[in-house]
Image: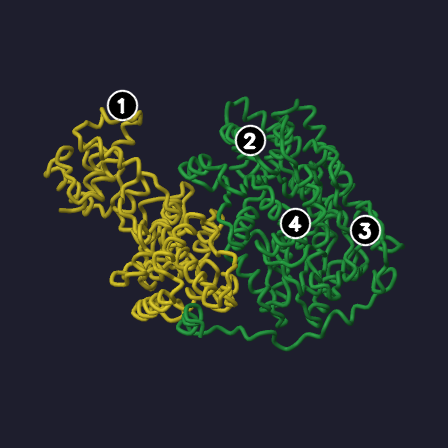
Chain colours: A yellow, B green
Amino acid sequence: MFHQILLQIFQKLNHERTISAAYHILRGKRSGQTIQDIGLFQLHPYFGLLPKLPREVFDETVALFQQYSWLEVQASGHYSCTKVGLQRAAQTPEFLLAGWYYRGNEHLFFGRLSLIIQSLSYHQTNTRSFTPISKDIHIQAWVRQFLLEHHYQQGHLQKQLWAECEQALKELPVCEENKQLMVYRLSGHQLPGWTWQQLAMERKETVLDCQLAFIELLHVWLNSIHGYPLLQQIAEGVRVQALLTDSAQQTAFLYEQGYSIDQIAQIRKLKQSTIEDHIVEMAMYEPNFSIGSFVTYGEAAKVWQASKQYQTKKLKILYEVIGDMSYFQLKLVLAKGEV
Amino acid sequence: MELEQLLVKHFGYTSFRPGQREIIEAILEGQDVLALLPTGMGKSLCYQLTGYVLQKPVLVISPLLALMQDQVEELKRFGEKRVVALNSFLTAHEKRYTLHFLEQYRFIFTSPEMLLQQQVQDKLAQMELGLIVVDEAHCISQWGFDFRPDYLRIGQWLSMEKRPPVLALSATATEKVMHDICQTLSLNRPFEFIYSVDRPNIRLGRMMFSEKAEKAEKAQWALQHMTTSTGPGILYVASRKRAEQYSQALLQAGVHTAAYHAGYGAEDRQFIQQQFLDGELDWIVATNAFGMGINKPDIRQVIHETMPANVANYMQEIGRAGRDGQPALAILLYADGDEELAKFVATNDLPTAHHVERYQQLQQQQLLPSQMLKNGEIGETAFRVLDYWLQQESVEQVVQRLNELVVEKYRAVDEMQKIITTKACIRTQLLHYFGQHLKKQPVQCCEICGIQYEDVQQERRKQVKDIAMMSWQQRLQQLLLGT
């Protein structure tokens, strides 16, 4: 699954970026460039899937792709997919990932769920003492509150939670093996979970692929959690509401108060280009944001025409072809999308 | 109320374990106490029960955050609500709140780092504490395997004028380390309780291999032994890689096994521990990361695939066998030349003169020395040690000190080797190392005195427990509905 995901990303960024861009996307790097790439190339599913992915693992995979002749990488890090590579990418299944909206928070959801289920399982057998599976004291506090609020001692909670999980999982458009995978990451009284390695051996795949299948299942589950009151509560605050980076949000606040880019740069003691990146971010993710004060309609049309003609979103090429627009303006037009 | 009554009331036990009563009584008389009690012998009860007699807050300083959390949860399980952990896990808001109401808690757990903060010290100075407990006190000694520089600084704090009694607790310590503890904590003629380190029900086995054939032969012997006899048992190895190799080989031979080392995530490590406790695993192949907090009474065998770095580690690791008092077996596999590997492992993560240089270099460039840690140039413990000493002493002194540290680690390996290659009773030698004498020799003593392996190791049964995967529906039902 990791190979397939990586192929898909490489396909979408073909000719346009360096190898590293894919790495930053998977790790969820919060830089202007990566954030803009997400919007430009429609990479939302993959953002921040593997925040801890070691560079070695990524590089090894890239080397493997070269060995398979799927990729050709230049010394500068720029690359292109070969015909075989593109064929392979076309054969990959469509994943139901939603990295952009969860950004690792799916693990918060699972952390809560798994501690709740562990607590209920031990409670069922009247075992009062156990080692909580989550060491995070904020998750522990949240779960304690949840259990008390639902009067867990009366015995209704586990029945209701079971019914919700059973029903919700039954309806998920995910294969049975992956549902099984997820419940084996849960643990309870005399029901230890299975380690990633144990699961990988059973499923005859790599640990990383197991973890990705697990993440995909959580994303799908979270997307369809509406209508399940308990699960919905457990998923509270998990979906990212503010899609802008924190810093861009501060810029947005000042911008809405009528400050110019120059003024914002001065107030925030940041470079003008950084503020411009924030504005681009806003153009991308705030549907009502108008780029009219920076670019005319005619200019925007010109950019799209050039982009089509030369089959690229590469700024450098567009900049040279068009001649009289700044990089900032080009980025804005591309970020806003074709009207 | 009598101590026994309090014991029943708060903890549900009807009698004390060896040492507990003596230790508690000494504290109540206002004495400082140094207590060496092995894990699983009720160390914590010594201050827990005292807390109910004193009616003044007990401050417990504990260097390991994970352990601290366990202790807090243990007290909560016994129904104690007035217990708190004041550590870096708290948010700023929680910390302010906790500090504000600090005197209302009966048990306050904190870390050395936290204790050094001015606001914490100020608050504590206004309170009247009943007892100060220093847990894992061996961490104070720089010769210990997990030296914590911040622990040294506590010594300064403890030298304040009017202070309550101090209880220093540890599971293992040599005479040298005990001396360090007393001096650093400025214990005032402490009452010492030292539990005998001898574990008569553990047979001390040893297998010698020649250097040449070492790896293959040893591995062959270990695999043969583990596939034909049953655990529950632990095989200690020197590296993560080796742990993986052994567990793979055993799994292929159809033995329920899991590797355990610090390379796994926290959940995975807990899953393995629980599988082991629940009897789903026969063998754990582990680095020395395994064991902290593990309390499984029926571990029958502990095998060392290569020699441990020092005698204290060895005792602690074999001490996990036979907690139920039934016969257990410890086997140490030794090949000529193993001490070289042990020396390498023991000193591998120590800071070196090169690190001292880098540290200075970064400082001169006005960069944070902690960059070395971020870049992965140095391990966490090593950086902590380096950082501490370079703030205290001159560069020459620190380099000198680091050299001494290496020499000391080498010496510790040599001592271990001496005991392994001895022609005299191994048990007597081990006790001697801790400054103790063997009172009564068990019939099944050690390799030299002659022991039987057979009646401890049972023949391997076919399947320990059926652990084929269930459908997700079944498992979900078992988890939540118990059926």
Q: Is residue A146 left or right of residue B431?
A: left
Q: Nearer the viewer, residue B239 or B423?
A: B423
Whichever of callouts 3 and 2 sits on the residue coming sooner in the sequence is 2
Q: Which quadrant of the figure has residue B264?
A: bottom right
Along the horizontal axis of the image, is A188 left or right of A324? right
Horizontal side of residue B226 vs B272, given as left or right? right
- Tell me the CA gap for discs 3 and 2: 37 Å
Q: Label 1 belongs to which residue? A: A266
* Crowd band around label 1 with a 10 angstrom C-alpha radius: few (<14), some (14–19), many (20+): few
Choose top left, top right, bottom left or bottom right for residue A30. top left
Q: Which residue is mark 2?
A: B116
Furthest-bottom residue in view? B462
Q: Nearer the viewer, mark 1 or mark 2?
A: 2
Seen in the image, is B410 located left or right of residue A95?
Answer: right
Q: Which residue is mark 3?
A: B430
Residue B200 position (above or below residue A251): below
Subunit of label 2:
B
